[in-house]
Image (cartoon, grey):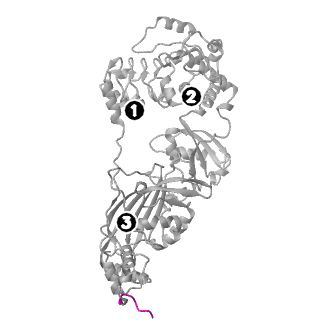
Amino acid sequence: MAPTGPRASRQQTTQRSATRPTRGGGITKNRVRVKTDRDGDIAMDSPAAGATNGAERGGSRGRGRASRASARGSTRVSTRLAQLDRANPNRVTLKVLGLRESKAAGNPDKGRRALIEFLEKKASKSKRIIIGRSVLDGEYLWISINKDDAADVLRLSGYAFAGSNLYITETEEKMPGRDTEDISKEAQETKQKLLSVLARRYNPEQRLLDLSALGADEVLSTMGTFDSQTLAEKAFKVLVHIASAQYKTDQEKAEAIQAVSLARNDINDVAQVFSLALSLPDLKQLDLTGNKLDTTSKLNKWQLRFKNLAELHLTGNPVTVQENYVTEMLQWFPALQILDGRQVRTPEEAAAALKALEPSPIAQFPSNIRDGENNVAAAFLQAFFPMFDTDRARLAAEFYDGDTWFSLAAIPDSGRNLPWKSYMKYSRNIQAVGARTPAMVQRLFTNGTVIADLWKALPPTRHAPMDEPGRWLVDCHTFPHLADPSGQAATAMGLMINVHGQFDEADPSTNIFGTRTFTRTFILGPSKPSTPPPAHPYRVLSDQLTLHKWVEAPKSETNATPLTISTPAVVNTPAVVGVAGIPNDAVKAQLIEQLSKRTGMTAQYSRLCLEGAANWNFAIALQSFEEQKSNLPPEAFVAAV
C-alpha cells in the first residue's frame, strides 16, 4: 500500500494521539495555524500555533458524506489532483512537429493517441516512459513529461512516424489550454484543503514537514484520498509538489524544509513515495520508521538521490535486520552520518565520501598534430573552414569527389534558443542500439556534388580564425592501409583529423543568431589520378559533422602548447599540401604539374622546388617560389609560345 496508514475514527485518532509514545527516531506532529500570502498560498515558514483551522473542521463535518462516496466521487478527486499536478516543476513541456503531415492525422483523434503511444514505446527500452497531459494545437502536439525522461523523448527528433518525420523541442512557453490558474473551482477547493494539511504538519522551528500516518489524517480521509492505492500515491505526490512550490528558489526551499517524516504510512516500496526525491532532493533528515520496507531492493530507487542526507531512521522496518543493510545505506547516501540513532560516519568521513562522488574533470590536453614534416592537417584546416563559411560549392569541388562520404549528426540541446529544424531532416543520429531506422541509414551522403547541394540547405556559419588557439582543439594521426587509387601500391597513407570548436550561426528562416558547438572528423587520402589532374594531391574520403550540446569554448591551459599553424595562408588559394609521408610517384607527378601551371616554371625546376625544404608540401613550395622567383634564371620558366 502507498501511504495509506490506518484509517480511524475521530475517537480512535484522539486516543492514539494521547497514548502513543515517540517511536524509534520518529518525529512527532506539531500543529500550526494556516497562514497565507497575498496570492492565497500557504506560507510554509509561518509561526507555529496550536489552533485547528476552519478547513480542518469543515473536513470533519464532511466525513460521513466522503465515506459514502462512490467510485465516481473518487474519480473526481483524482481528476482534481491531476489538475493540481500540471504545474509540477519536475515536468517539462515538449513540442512535437510532424503529426499533421503523418498518415495518422486522419484518425478520429487526429493521430494524437497513436503518436503518444509511439513516443512512449520508442523513447527508452530500459525504463517506462509515461507522457502526461497533451494538447493538439495547430501544427504542434504539446506534451508534458517528467524532466528525467525528456532527454529520451527528445532523442526521437528526426524519427519517422506514420510517413512523417518528427521534430521535437523543449519549450518554456505555456501549454495551450487550461493551466493551474484556470483549474476548476473544485480543484481550487481541493488545493486549499491540502494546504491546510501541510500547514498543520509543518514545524518551522525544526524545519520539519511531518507527513507521518497520513491515513489517519481527518481532512485527507474526508476527501477520499485513500479510496485506492493509486489515489493515495497521487495525493502524496501532489502534497509534496504543493509544499515544494511555496518557495521561489531551490536554495530557499532547501533551507526551509530540511527534515521530512514518512513514519507509519504502510510503505513497502519507496517507489510509492518516489516524488519526494524529485521535489525535495536536499533533505538532511528523513524518518521512515514503522513502515514495511523488508529489503534494500525496496529502497534502491532512492540510491544517490538524497546526496545531503545526514540522518536516516528506518527503525521498525524488516530491512534493518538484513545483513548488508548498513553497508548499502552508506553507499547509497554518501553524506549519511546517523542511521537509526547511531553514528555510522564522522562528518569528515561523510565529506570525503561525498567528494568522492564528484567526477574528476578530464584533463584537457593541447592540440596534437602528428602528420610528419608535411604539415598537412594544419594547412588543410586553414583552408577548409574559411571556404565552408564563404564558398561551400568550391570547397566540395576542390576536396570532395564521387566517393566521398558525408554525414551529419544533430543532438538537440533544448537549453539553447537556436532552432534545430534545419539540421534534423538530415541528421543521421543513430546513437542508440536498435534505433537504425531506414530513413536514418539513408542519410549517409555520397558524392561531392550531392554534398554541396546538402550544404546549401544548412544555415550560414562563421568559424573562428585558426590563429586563435583557445577556440580550437585539434587531433591528427596518420591513417594507414588506405587503398592506393593510383594502383602503384597495395595501400597508401592518410590522415584522420578530429576538430572540436564552435561557430556562429545565422538561420535566415527564423532570423535567429547564436553559437553552436561542433565536432568534425575528417579522413584524408590521396587523390585519384585524372585528366586534368585533381585540384589537390589529396581528397576528403570521409567527413562527419556532429552538432551537440552547447558548451563554452575550449580554453588552453596556461602550461599547454596551443595549436599553431606554421604554414601561412596563401592569398586567394587554399593552402594545400601533399598526403602524409612522402607521396608516391603518381602524386609527385601531379604536384609537379600543378606547381608548374601555377608558377610557369619548367617541370625540372618545379620538382627542385618541391623536393627541397618544402619536402613535397605544395603550400610551402608555392611560398618559396614567391620569395625566390626574382632570383631564378630565365631557363627556370617555360618559354612563351
Callout 2 crowding tier (Cα within 10 Å): few <14, some 14–19, many ≥20: some
Between 486 and 75, the one nearer to me in the picture? 486
Answer left or right for 530 relative to 168. left
Secondary structure found at label 3: helix
Q: Mark 2 or mark 3, which is nearer to you? A: 3
Secondary structure found at label 1: loop
Residue 628 lies, in percent from the top left, at 36, 79
The image quarter in which residue 84 lies: top right
3D distance between C-alphas at marks 2 and 3: 55 Å
Residue 619 lies, in percent from the top left, at 38, 73
Q: Mark 3 or mark 1, which is nearer to you? A: 3
Q: Amino acid at mark 2?
A: Ala
Residue 13 lies, in percent from the top left, at 53, 9
3D distance between C-alphas at marks 1 and 2: 23 Å
Answer left or right for 137 relative to 206. right
Task: Point out which mark residue 412 bears.
Answer: none
Task: Let me know if residue 636 is in the magenta part.
Answer: yes
Q: Is residue 102 above or below residue 123?
A: below
Q: Say which residue appears at 39% left-offset and 22% top-offset.
A: 312
Task: Point out which mark residue 377 bears.
Answer: 3
Q: Mark 1 or mark 2, which is nearer to you? A: 2
Callout 1 crowding tier (Cα within 10 Å): few <14, some 14–19, many ≥20: some
Q: Say which residue appears at 56% left-offset and 65% top-offset.
A: 456
Give the mark, 2 or 3, whose residue is nearer the N terminus: 2
Residue bearing mark 1: 304
Q: Look at the numbered discs 3 and 1 and tell me whether their residues touch, using CB distance below 8 Å.
A: no
Q: Start and end of the magenta stretch? A: 635-641
Predominant secondary structure, magenta span: loop
Q: Amino acid at mark 1?
A: Leu
Task: Let me know if residue 177 is in the magenta part.
Answer: no
Q: Quadrant of the C terminus?
A: bottom left
Residue bearing mark 2: 245
